[in-house]
Image: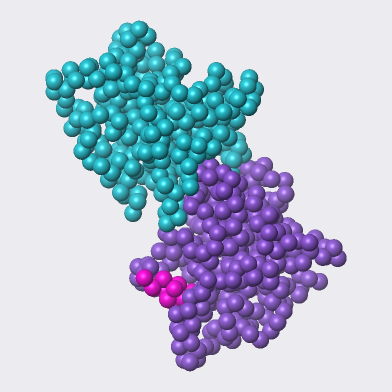
Chain colours: A purple, B cyan
Amino acid sequence: MLASSAVLRRQHFLIRSLGTHNNQNHTQRIRYIQTVTMVAEADAENILRRITPILDPNRHKGQAGKVAVVGGCREYTGAPYFAAISALKLGADLSHVFCTKDAAAVIKSYSPELIVHPVLEESYSVRDDEKRAVSTKVLAEVARWMERFDCLVVGPGLGRDPFLLLARRSNVPIVIDGDGLFLVTNSIDLVSGYHLAVLTPNVNEYKRLVQKMLGSEVNDQDASQQLLALARSIGGVTILRKGKSDMISDGYSVHTVSIFGSPRRCGGQGDILSGSVALFLSWALQSSTAPGDSTTSLSNPMVLGCIAASALLRKAASVAFENKKRATLTSDIIEHLGQSLDDICPAC
Amino acid sequence: MLASSAVLRRQHFLIRSLGTHNNQNHTQRIRYIQTVTMVAEADAENILRRITPILDPNRHKGQAGKVAVVGGCREYTGAPYFAAISALKLGADLSHVFCTKDAAAVIKSYSPELIVHPVLEESYSVRDDEKRAVSTKVLAEVARWMERFDCLVVGPGLGRDPFLLLARRSNVPIVIDGDGLFLVTNSIDLVSGYHLAVLTPNVNEYKRLVQKMLGSEVNDQDASQQLLALARSIGGVTILRKGKSDMISDGYSVHTVSIFGSPRRCGGQGDILSGSVALFLSWALQSSTAPGDSTTSLSNPMVLGCIAASALLRKAASVAFENKKRATLTSDIIEHLGQSLDDICPAC
């Protein structure tokens, strides 16, 4: 029941987005540019309180969020695990991982909480002439799952194209990170114009996107205008540019998140972020009951999800760093996600 | 950007080293011998403070260190894990392990924080006539990664020769421990004259090196002269001779580290050391901005890395032993690495 209302809500959001973003007239375009001169620090704590659902004993399994992570290959097993477990630790009910067979056994061993599907093939084990057949097989395996998910995170591993296509066909939101961004940068049509897509580039991934889409280098003097132009050039997807301050834009306005944070840059924090964005944007979509005011980014559930996830990762990282200092690892940060959310938005 | 400055810094260090160490004249040789009569306990805490980088929120992932460990085979999975996780727990951003396929699944399962590459073959599964083909395959797999690393730790597992050759070609520092030392003792040309190499022999590995290179037995009455001669006989590599006191020489002078320590001799502590040396020497190379004074070993980043790692392992081991006494294991020591560093050199 809720699944279908979630699907309807996503469709409504897409229809509204198409109306306000794609068919913008000249006056609106000018307003966009004026808006962006006011790059604002988002009121992240308030947004977290707004979108985090009340824990209601009448709800049943799945209603607090079902996230799927596509990733995991021969080298990378930690990344999809971090993304999937982060969503659970923040309050998702179910977290799936789609990965290669070799990666599956390892990811399962990290935690019995995850549902792990060994459906992908390693790139080195697939010949070029077999790729289409492999894609078809993956499609068949995954199609029956796709509509059940509230959000899909796409990271490393072969066979991501069919996931993107399927998710888009089913109006399932997508968070694209890591190697997924490499794929998308080279095949931008996979996400272009899809308002339920979020890209979360780091410094190098952002650089490649800017070069590809804007034909220029990254300009930190005018970072917000460039981010706005980039989001708009990909047809109004939402971009979360990771950095000392995180910057978020859907091509409409730009928000920054600078609160909290830690100076530790251990690998894996981006995976916490992608899993968290997935859950928070699902919650934001669920809570976006009020129609109408879609003229500001702060009614865009994608943007709200990014702001919420950014702030919460930064808070958990700062608490972990207080305790562990230089020894802080990604697992330590994950252990502080729940308490960090509860500090801002108590469960009861 | 930083990667290339790190590469440049390593090249400058090598050029300086070649100038001062290889082209030494007779007077310099005499001065070496005079210097060594003053075997000094290193001011390890001060060195730790000197080389450990400030945690700067403007830095991004990778800039605090990217370490790779080559090791892991059918028998050994703990050793490369201990080395790789130790570097992370001291503050490295990324830690990779290159190992055999069987070892990979196990090493991954120890921790999702590591990036594990199953590229090596088990020695029993490779016939003599296949060895060249296997080496070529490993080379191809690893070449694209090598320049990204700040330091390589070479331990147990077949297929290490190509790693040593590749690292040397790319001016990547190497720490050689365990079975890696067995390989190097039999093929000393692999490291001879490479000033970015550190050997970390235990009592038996040291004995074999001395027999091979100096044609004599270990002489504990004149330990420092012998260590100096050994380091010089391998063309100025740095040797960390592990023992009740650790002794360190680059063929130029000799330093001891005797502070802290624990009477517990559980296996695996050498792996903590090799991973720690890798990180600390990377940091020492990063911080060696002042050109010029390369006439003392205390400006040699390899020596500084050894002193720092030795002292820190000894401190963490002593704290772990206070808590766990005879039950102290290597994992317990690893859990005290971060706090031990922070006690000497607070993160903030």
Q: Quadrant of residue B39?
A: top left
Q: Quadrant of residue B131?
A: top left
| Residue B328 spot, x, y in % from top left | 61, 24
Residue under the image location 63 percent in, 27 percent down: B323
Q: For this rendering, which residue is in front, B39 or B291?
A: B39
Residue in front for this viewpoint, B284 or B168: B284
Residue lying at 56% horizontally and 44% vertically, measured from the top left: A324
Q: Residue at x 32, y 15 (%)?
A: B224
Q: Does A56 sit above or below residue B224?
A: below
Picture quarter with the N terminus of chain A: bottom right
**Residue A306, relative to residue B307: is it above or below?**
below
Residue farthest left in this picture: B26
Instruction: Look at 46% across and 65% down and name the residue there.
Output: A185
For residue A126, above or below residue B80 = below
Q: Is residue B99 visible?
A: no
Where's residue B340, x and y in %? 52, 34
Picture coordinates of residue A338, whole percent (x, y) = 68, 55
User: Does residue A58 show up?
Assistant: yes
Provide the major secondary structure of the magenta segment: helix
Q: Which residues are magenta?
A: A221-235
The image shows residue A52 at horizontal and vertical percentages of: 70, 67
State whether residue A284 is above or below residue A311: below
Could you tell me how many numbered marks the image carries? 0
Judging depth in this view, the residue of A152 and B161 nearest the camera is A152
- The verdict on residue A228 being magenta is yes
Closer to the camera in the image, B145 or A340? A340
